[in-house]
Amino acid sequence: MKFYIGIDLGGTNVRTLLVDEEGNVYSEVKDVTEREKGPDYVVSKICRQIDALDLSACGGINGVEGIGIGVPGPVDTVNGVMIMATNLPGFENYPICQKLADRYNLPTFIDNDANVAGLAEALLGAGKGYPIVYYVTISTGIGGALIVDGKLVSGGRGHAGEIGNIIVKNNGYKFGTLNPGAIEAEGSGTAITRKGKELLGEGAVSHAGNVFELAANGNTIAQGIVDEVVSQLATMFADIAHIVDPYCFIIGGGVMKSKKYFFANLEEQFNQKIHVGMRGHIQLLATELEDCGAIGAAMLPMSRLAK
Amino acid sequence: MKFYIGIDLGGTNVRTLLVDEEGNVYSEVKDVTEREKGPDYVVSKICRQIDALDLSACGGINGVEGIGIGVPGPVDTVNGVMIMATNLPGFENYPICQKLADRYNLPTFIDNDANVAGLAEALLGAGKGYPIVYYVTISTGIGGALIVDGKLVSGGRGHAGEIGNIIVKNNGYKFGTLNPGAIEAEGSGTAITRKGKELLGEGAVSHAGNVFELAANGNTIAQGIVDEVVSQLATMFADIAHIVDPYCFIIGGGVMKSKKYFFANLEEQFNQKIHVGMRGHIQLLATELEDCGAIGAAMLPMSRLAK
């Protein structure tokens, strides 16, 4: 059995685990991040967490194969640094992997939180056994991850899976730095809420779930929003399908709480928008794991060190 | 040095090569396919070609590592059969790999012609040395191929790279079984010619190159067509970039003959449509190899047998 240390470094909390190659958790330490104290302080906190883990299962730090870190934001996986760190001030280009690799003399890898969650789902969750998996999270934003033969394909600059920027509507809504009509601006939880407030009134909608519920209760305006969003999400899934033809999609994120209202329709429209020979062959699956960021991070060295 | 046999099986001609792992060709046999005589006959012809190769470089058939076949149309790479065979009647679900594997006692692989051309370009051509390559051909149709760490990612049903069906225009042109507004219906050579004939007159346009030339000579209608097509192609490249973040695109096909008229503009618009952190990092490269179908086919066993 091989053992890995996984670190889920968020803007609010930081969590460190000892995990084996099957995803079993042996020891866990969790603290507030205190990001305002800067990266050197946060890294010293992570080191204290690693030192505080019970490593008896693998006979101490020498029994660990590697360290993985999941972070919020795009990562330069080649140089092991964050490219953008809105939620972790000071971590842009900060040599976090180098620091931990030097301290523990272990190969250390970093990737963004959507990628590590996707890796966990592909290896241990809904995607177990599928050679090509595309993970998609539809939440505040929309992100994803490509896993081929158990290995995360992070891309040249760690941007593989930045699917929120895929264009699904010509001259559509412009949100932040995204393309006009990008799927994140049209079909994310944020976008569904925005459309709901616009067309149904501020008071009628406080989150995306309200729009789905109103549609299910016969509100035709809400139904119009749901129809448009499902069609746009189907376009995004079809685009991905034609580009990598995964065996399955694994779909998570807050919007999936409303799964019963839209999933069958999404599946139908997705299958209409892909080539005949692909129809019925690509599974659309819901995520199986909960809170899998740190476990997915632990899978990073396993994925990268695999022959 | 390792040696492979590559077969480029087209509707008109069939070509068989002995190739080494660096793409050097040692022996070649080419014949008309005579597809009308059916798959058994065509396979017997391929066997005659293999038997006719000069295999002295590798000391005979026992010195060959494997056989690869490139075919026009989608392939079930797991079962080694064509899924659709418009240009090779009778080859649908015909066990071509099994037949050759049994006859020569060699691992035998099949994939579609865009995928094998992309593999050749990734391993031996413009993509040499890049860990993630996306190959795109813009010709009569639009197709592509994903190559990760020297291995072709063909997809669950061999449809990875069927990018012609990516939607770039809502309620756009409907061509055959493609999605309305699919890039192949909007930005392929066929589509550019169609748009040209429609707006400039049947007599003014006989192929896509005419539209680019007219635009370059100041024809504002032709320029409008070029502007739309370049914007649509940029959308397709941006979609792919966000999904797999390749180190480079390798772009081939007949439309690239008009490269000088549109490529700089395509590169600029592509970079506008991707995330800031990706801009300038993804190379758009022209293909380097010519007529690389059979060499790419020979690379298939190398790619699939690689550890």
Image (cartoon, coloured by chain):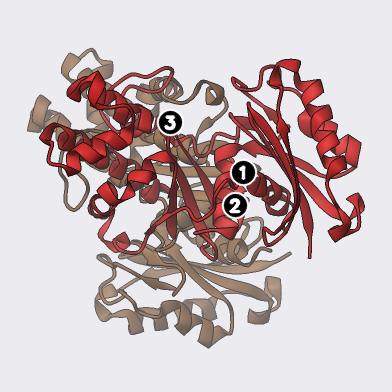
Chain colours: A red, B brown
**Picture layout, residue A125 above or below residue B147:** below
Mark 2, residue position: A120
Element assignment for label 2: helix
> Looking at the picture, which amino acid does disc 1 mark?
Gly
Question: Amino acid under label 3?
Answer: Thr
- Identify the mark nearer the N-term, 3 or 1: 3
- Residue B234: give x, y in percent of width and height: 37, 29
Q: Position of residue B254 (x, y in %)?
A: 34, 40
Q: For marks 3 and 2, give the one nearer the viewer.
A: 3
Q: Which mark is residue A140?
A: 3
Disc number lying in front (1 or 2): 1
Mark 2 surroundings within 10 Å by alpha-carbon count, few (fewer than 14), some (14 through 19), many (20 or more): many
Are the two marked residues, 1 and 2, in contact with CB atoms closer than 8 angstroms? yes
B104 and A127: which one is in front?
Answer: A127
| Residue that appears at 32% across and 60% down | A278
Q: In which quadrant of the rendered view does residue A103 lie?
A: top right
> On the image, numbered disc 1 is attached to which residue?
A293
Residue drawn at x 41%, y 83% as measured from the top left: B44
